[in-house]
Amino acid sequence: MTITLRDVQSSDLDTILAINNSAGDSIIPIDGQRMARFLDIARYFRVAEADGLVVGFLIGLTPEANYDSPNFHWFKSKYDDFLYIDRVVMTSDHRRSGVGRLFYADVLNFCEVRRPRLTCEVFLEPRDDVSLVFFATQGFVEVGQQDLSNNRKVSLMSKELESYSFVSETYLQLDQSLPDWASQDRLNTRAKLSHEPLRRSA
């Protein structure tokens, strides 16, 4: 089985929503309008495909996103800059198959040249030991806890990205241009395309 990652497309939303809402207690169900909103606010929004079928997705947000999650706002109150992993979800038959680690490697590669830290939350009530072990073994540490509605409680976790210091000191602070692959993301690429004039053939 070959797994490939790619940026989300609007045609994926129905499948992604079904995967999200059938994931169980560790993922909060949402409606289609809220899922579609991520197309406009998520700097990282990628899907995993196996044999041409979408089998998972990961959504990452940065502080300027207009998003009402209490966990996202907790991180905004603590840090100036970060990428927040809002959710990473796989179909039931692709859990514990390496897709989550593939997503993590990809989002880490995306983030470490753009942001100084990765953040996420993991449920303590109901307890999600699979995710707790996964993120802890990837270098995330707990920086807080938060009580949510419906008797839920989360561990708020963060990972400092040491490589970002090099990028910041070598490029950003000296107004040096980064390569396109390191400076572009799905939102600023969309914005650039939307302002380009239409080219008509003669």
Image: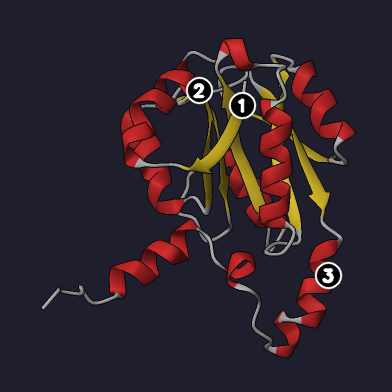
Q: Mark 1 points at which residue?
A: 2
Residue furthest to the bottom? 174
CA separation in Å, label 1 and label 2: 7 Å
SS class, disc 1: loop
Q: Does residue 53 appear left or right of residue 121 in this picture? A: left
CA separation in Å, label 3 and label 1: 34 Å
Tag 1 near tag 2, CB within 8 Å: yes
> For the residue carrying disc 3, how many other residues have a C-alpha within 10 Å: few (<14), some (14-19), or many (20+)?
some
Q: Residue 165 carries which label?
A: 3
- Which of the 4 quarters of the picture holds residue 133? top right
Tell me the residue at 29%/75% (across/down). Answer: 196
- Nearer-the-camera pick, 75 or 174: 174
Above or below residue 155? Residue 128 is above
Residue furthest to the front? 202
CA separation in Å, label 2 and label 3: 38 Å
Q: Residue 51 carries which label?
A: 2
Q: Residue 171: x percent and y percent? A: 74, 81
Tag 2 near tag 3, CB within 8 Å: no
> For the residue carrying disc 2, how many other residues have a C-alpha within 10 Å: few (<14), some (14-19), or many (20+)?
few
Above or below residue 188? Residue 103 is above
Q: Residue 69: x percent and y percent? A: 53, 40
- Which of the 4 quarters of the picture holds residue 153? top right
